[in-house]
Image (cartoon, rainbow, N blue to C red):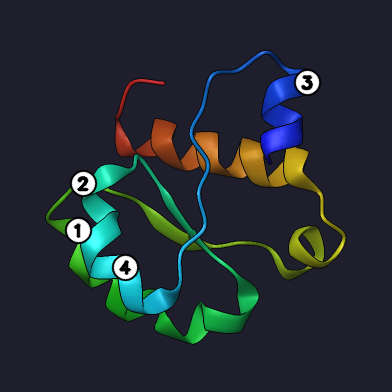
Amino acid sequence: MKEAADTRGLDVEIAAYAAHEFDEQVGKYDVVLLGPQVKYMLASFKEKAEGKGVPVAAIDMMDYGMQRGDNVLDFAFSLIEKSGQPL
């Protein structure tokens, strides 16, 4: 994702955290993407993030596995846009 953002000349902050850090980090970002290995936590994380207006979704397994950062970046932007946040 960072490489795709750099290629596009986008100034974005992309970070990765362990699932147990979710509560502490969720309010600091415009979107949260989960890796396929923690997709089972999606419903719980969505519920926690709802009050903060932060969209939460799982990264497509194929995009994750094939390291298609450009697709994942586009997905993140689409979630932000759907949530009504400015890009």
Q: Which of marks 3 and 1 is nearer the N terminus?
A: 3
Q: Which of marks 2 and 3 is nearer the N terminus?
A: 3
Picture residue at 46% right of the left edge, 64% below the top: 17
Q: How far apart are marks 4 and 1 (CA)?
A: 13 Å
Give the structural element (helix, strand or loop) at label 3: helix
Give the structural element (helix, strand or loop) at label 2: loop
From the viewer's perspective, is the residue at label 4 or at label 2 nearer? 4
Q: Distance between the residues labelled 1 and 2?
A: 5 Å
Q: How crowded is mark 2: few (under 14 residues within 10 Å), some or many (20 or more)?
A: some
Give the structural element (helix, strand or loop) at label 1: helix
Give the labeled residue for mark 3: 7
Q: Distance between the residues labelled 4 and 3?
A: 28 Å
Residue 44's quadrant in the figure?
A: bottom left
Amino acid type assigned to the residue bearing label 2 in the image: Gly
Give the labeled residue for mark 1: 50
Q: Distance between the residues labelled 4 and 2?
A: 14 Å
Q: Which residue lies furthest to the top in this view?
A: 9
| Residue 80 picture location, percent across and down | 41, 36
Q: Distance between the residues labelled 3 and 1?
A: 32 Å
Give the structural element (helix, strand or loop) at label 4: helix
Is the C-beta separation of discs 1 and 2 under 8 Å?
yes
Q: Earlier in the sequence, mark 4 or mark 2?
A: 4
> In this rendering, is residue 71 above or below 33?
above
Nearer to me, 60 or 29: 29
